[in-house]
Image (tube, coloured by chain):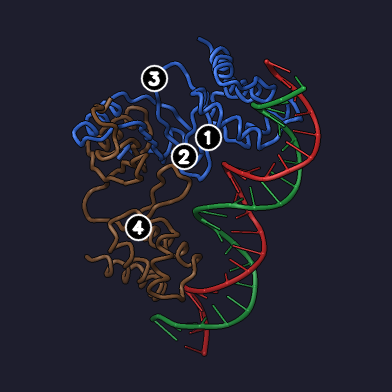
Chain colours: A brown, B blue, C green, D red
DNA sequence: GTAAATGCAAACCGTTTGCTGTACA
DNA sequence: TGTACAGCAAACGGTTTGCATTTAC
């Protein structure tokens, strides 16, 4: 099922409406492979259609998260970054402390381990948030090894 | 070396001063085994000494982080939680989505894995942020297993 | 005595909300 | 045509900053 179908279905099921703004925000997130923040989404939306408010961007993002089409990530800067949910398995992020680049990686082992840990403690795990910071290949001081 | 010694040394080395307020904030964090936020620290500080401002609490926390005596954690609520650095190895947190309880756990395997991952990608890892959310032993629905 | 640090209040920034008008179904 | 949604601006909560005053060294 495509994201557009999913959107239609979620709208239909909940008596909500397909608006220009909702389409636009989802489009922007799908086209971008980056991790845009609300302000960046707002700017891009404005370029295509001046009749969009920042509050609507936030409301739309909340809605898209609610229906599972968008994920929000915090990279420790005190504001959210948004990403259209992809079909492949969940992933984590590495942020370069110099250039700010965000690198995605998958680590099924972490998820396994997380579940084992929680099982052994009697905890019911719902969400795993794993985020790395450091220096990317371009920005790391020459000759340093990953310590 | 005790935390107080470390504080003295850091102050001395940087030409900074030992103030009532800095001692107080560090004391509060050391006595508490919780993950206090700035507001909670401020309230506790006020109880002991009314001449303390919230801005000073924030400035002091920034300073204590800078010299490595305090760590800040984000639990996805949009504000920081602070913890005096302990001597034992780094740890991670599990937040109960119902009662809000924060459980600490250690997982050297995660750190190992993180380093291996970064090595294989040529990334220099500086910080690992691992945070779990879910339901604690008391709050999880009866009969559910950790899925 | 003189920096450094404080308290206060105002500014800040990302996000949310109330209200009135707009547009989707 | 009715109700969900939009835009705007004002409120919000956590944090930072500017400035006059205090205080550690």
Picture quarter containing residue B90?
top left
* Mark 4 vs 3: CB contact within 8 A: no
Q: Nearer the viewer, residue A55 or C12?
A: C12
Q: CA distance from mark 1 to mark 4?
A: 27 Å
* Mark 2 vs 3: CB contact within 8 A: no
Q: CA distance from mark 4 to mark 3?
A: 35 Å
Q: Earlier in the sequence, mark 1 or mark 3?
A: 1
Q: Tell me residue A91's x, y (percent).
A: 27, 45
Instruction: Find disc 1 in the rendering and name its residue.
Output: B81
Instruction: Find disc 2 in the rendering and name its residue.
Output: B75
* Quadrant assignment for the N terminus of chain A: bottom left
**Point 62% across, 20% down: residue:** B27
**Point 45% across, 65% down: residue:** A57
Q: Earlier in the sequence, mark 2 or mark 1?
A: 2
Disc 2 is attached to a residue of which chain? Answer: B
Determine crowd level at label 2: few under 14, some 14-19, many 20+ residues with C-alpha closer than 10 A: some
Q: CA distance from mark 2 to mark 1?
A: 8 Å
Whether labels 2 and 3 share one chain: yes
Determine crowd level at label 3: few under 14, some 14-19, many 20+ residues with C-alpha closer than 10 A: few
Determine crowd level at label 1: few under 14, some 14-19, many 20+ residues with C-alpha closer than 10 A: some
**Point 32% across, 71% down: residue:** A8
Q: CA distance from mark 4 to mark 2?
A: 20 Å
Instruction: Find disc 3 in the rendering and name its residue.
Output: B89
Q: Is residue D2 left or right of residue B136?
A: right
For residue B90, which numbered disc appears in the image?
none
Q: Tag 4's secondary structure?
A: strand
Picture quarter containing residue A107?
top left
Q: Earlier in the sequence, mark 2 or mark 3?
A: 2
For residue A70, which numbered disc appears in the image?
4
Q: Tell me residue A70's x, y (percent).
A: 35, 57
């Amino acid at each position: 099922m495509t994201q557009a179908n999913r959107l239609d279905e979620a709208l239909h099921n909940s008596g909500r409406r397909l608006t220009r703004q909702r389409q636009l925000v989802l489009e922007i997130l799908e086209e971008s492979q980056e991790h845009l923040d609300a302000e960046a989404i707002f700017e891009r939306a404005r370029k295509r259609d001046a009749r969009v408010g920042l509050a609507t961007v936030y409301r739309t993002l909340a809605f898209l998260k609610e229906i599972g089409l968008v994920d929000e990530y915090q990279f420790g800067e005190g504001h959210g970054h948004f990403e259209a949910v992809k079909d492949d398995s969940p992933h984590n992020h590495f942020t370069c402390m110099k250039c700010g680049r965000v690198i995605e990686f998958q680590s099924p082992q972490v998820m396994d381990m997380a579940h084992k840990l929680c099982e052994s403690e009697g905890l019911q795990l719902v969400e795993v948030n794993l985020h790395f910071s450091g220096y990317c290949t371009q920005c790391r001081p020459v000759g340093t090894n990953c310590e």
